[in-house]
Image (spheres, rainbow, N blue to C red):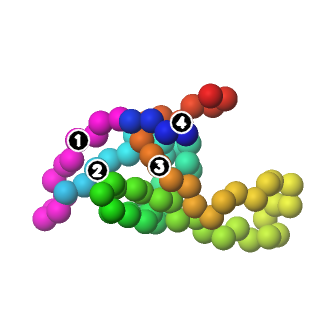
């Protein structure tokens, strides 16, 4: 999944922040306090840091990758 969207930077204390659309946070299951990695190498890449699941939680659910990237745009299902 790859798409492009434009976001505005906002002042946050002495720094600058960017907000993520609710659709992204819902899709990726993000909530305040979750951790992300930010990589800057000519591009800005935000990668979700996933917590390891307790194996006893659910044996029926398929394993997810340890992290997912948010590359911009709203996720689409089936495209």
In the picture as drawn, the residue positioned furthest to the top comes out as 79
User: Residue at (86%, 61%) from the top-left corner?
Assistant: 59
- CA distance separating discs 3 and 2: 13 Å
The answer to which of marks 4 and 1 sits earlier in the sequence is 1
Looking at the rendered image, the disc whose residue lies closer to the viewer, 3 or 2, is 3
| N-terminal label among 4 and 3 | 3
Label 2: how many residues lie within 10 Å, few (<14), some (14-19) or many (20+)?
few
Which numbered disc, 2 or 4, marks the residue closer to the eye?
A: 4
Circle on res. 8: 1
Dot 2 or dot 4: first in sequence order is 2
Chain-order first, disc 3 or disc 2 = 2
Magenta segment boundaries in residue numbering: 5-15
> Secondary structure beneath disc 1?
loop
- Image coordinates of residue 9 in percent, x first then y, are 21, 47
Q: Are marks 4 and 3 in contact (CB under 8 Å)?
A: no
Q: Is residue 2 magenta?
A: no
Q: Nearer the viewer, residue 24 or 13?
A: 24
Residue 68 x/y as whole percent? 56, 55
Question: Do residues under tags 1 and 3 come within 8 Å of each other at their CB atoms?
Answer: no
* Crowd band around label 3 with a 10 angstrom C-alpha radius: few (<14), some (14–19), many (20+): some
The residue tagged with tag 3: helix, strand or loop?
strand
Side (left or right) of 58 relative to 8? right
Q: Nearer the viewer, residue 50 or 69?
A: 69
Query: Could you give the CA–CA distance between mark 1 and mark 3, rounded to whole angstroms?
Result: 16 Å
Q: What kind of element bears circle 2?
A: strand
Disc on the earlier residue, 1 or 3: 1
In this rendering, is residue 7 above or below 39?
above
Give me the residue at 50% from left, 59% from top: 48
Report the residue at 67% width, 29% height from top. Answer: 78
The residue indicated by pointer 3 is 70
């Amino acid at each position: 999944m790859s798409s492009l969207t434009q976001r505005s930077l906002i002042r946050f204390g002495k720094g600058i922040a960017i907000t993520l659309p609710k659709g992204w946070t819902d899709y990726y299951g993000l909530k305040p306090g979750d951790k992300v990695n930010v990589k800057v190498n000519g591009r800005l890449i935000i990668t979700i840091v996933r917590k390891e699941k307790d194996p006893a939680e659910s044996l029926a659910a398929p394993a997810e990758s340890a992290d997912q990237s948010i590359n911009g745009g709203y996720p689409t299902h089936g495209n």
